[in-house]
Image: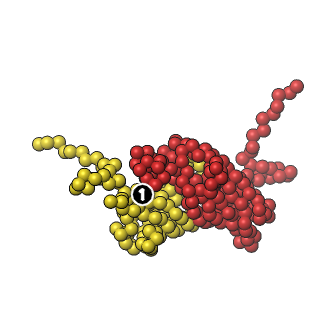
Chain colours: A red, B yellow
Amino acid sequence: MEPPVLVLRPLTDYTPNGEKLMLIGKTIDQLQVGDAAEFTKTVSETDIYLFAGVTGDFNPAHINETYAQQTFFKGRIAHGMLLAGLISAILGTQLPGPGTIYIKQELNFKAPVRIGDTVTARAEIVGLLPEKNKVTMKTTCTNQNGILVLDGEAVISPPKAPKK
Amino acid sequence: MEPPVLVLRPLTDYTPNGEKLMLIGKTIDQLQVGDAAEFTKTVSETDIYLFAGVTGDFNPAHINETYAQQTFFKGRIAHGMLLAGLISAILGTQLPGPGTIYIKQELNFKAPVRIGDTVTARAEIVGLLPEKNKVTMKTTCTNQNGILVLDGEAVISPPKAPKK
């Protein structure tokens, strides 16, 4: 028996005529209201500390347990913008995927996320404007107990089909 | 001559009577419309790669130069949410500072940021609602050429003075 062939996802696809097609996500004619994608991640202490280092957000609520114990949340919490990054991950890699241009994002921070919480980000298409190549998506993050920790709305421009 | 004394910023302050006061940012009575703060950072390739690792946003526009060269932006660009993190850094560490609760953020992505660009995030108070302990801030990011790369508005709840 032959060993299985490892198929690597190519950077470019080819048409039957051998023309190169750049790897892109879904174009607006491939999208429908109700289409949704999710990404789930357990938020670690390392995530929070790297995020602080990258952004400069060393708010003690995120990186000082002694201080954070005295606050309303009684312990360190993740940066809200780290969770927003999980939404960005869906839009840029899954739905619509590569080639998407991020136009606008509204974020409402609803509840804290702690070290070890498992967060599911979700993006669902709620509006399509084909004549402007714009898509509106409802975006949420929920924790392992089903509590909504973040909601909001994104406006994006999905990738356009390569020119012939 | 005595060597200079290194003064470390304490986790807690003390009243003249020796009562402990938690380190907090500015309360609403210490804030005025027009108050502003800035934070400037040169965005490095490392920042973008760490941000991708933390958030899962491996959109090739951010981490694949060969792909990105073929796109509208002609090269890798930073994650928009990384820039939003610079705004979060101002709110949580400078204005109002520690103890601030992030309620809402609206983000409009206006122009790309490339590796090596120096971004200045700015937050300016545009509205105060003392009876609800809420503050509205205009939030922007501008690059080294003065081009607006991100704008939007934040709504936050500044820290409350410790109870007597």
Q: Quadrant of the C terminus of chain A?
A: bottom right
Query: Is A164 located above or below residue A145 in the figure?
Result: below
Q: Residue at x 44, y 60 (%)?
A: B100
**Occupied quadrant, residue A155:** bottom right
Tell me the chain of label 1: B
Residue A72 lies, in percent from the top left, at 46, 55
**Which sits in the foreground, A74 or A19?**
A74
**Which sits in the foreground, B69 or B117?**
B117
Local crowd size for mark 1, using a 10 Å CA cut-off: few (<14), some (14–19), many (≥20): many
Disc 1: which residue: B99
Amino acid carrying mark 1 in the image? Gly
**Occupied quadrant, residue A125:** bottom right
Question: Which residue is farthest top?
Answer: A1
Residue A21 lies, in percent from the top left, at 76, 53
Could you tell whether B82 is left or right of A24 in the image? left
Q: How many marks are shown on the rendered structure? A: 1
Could you tell whether B105 is left or right of A63 in the image? right
Q: Residue at x 64, y 64 (%)?
A: A154
**Occupied quadrant, residue A3:** top right
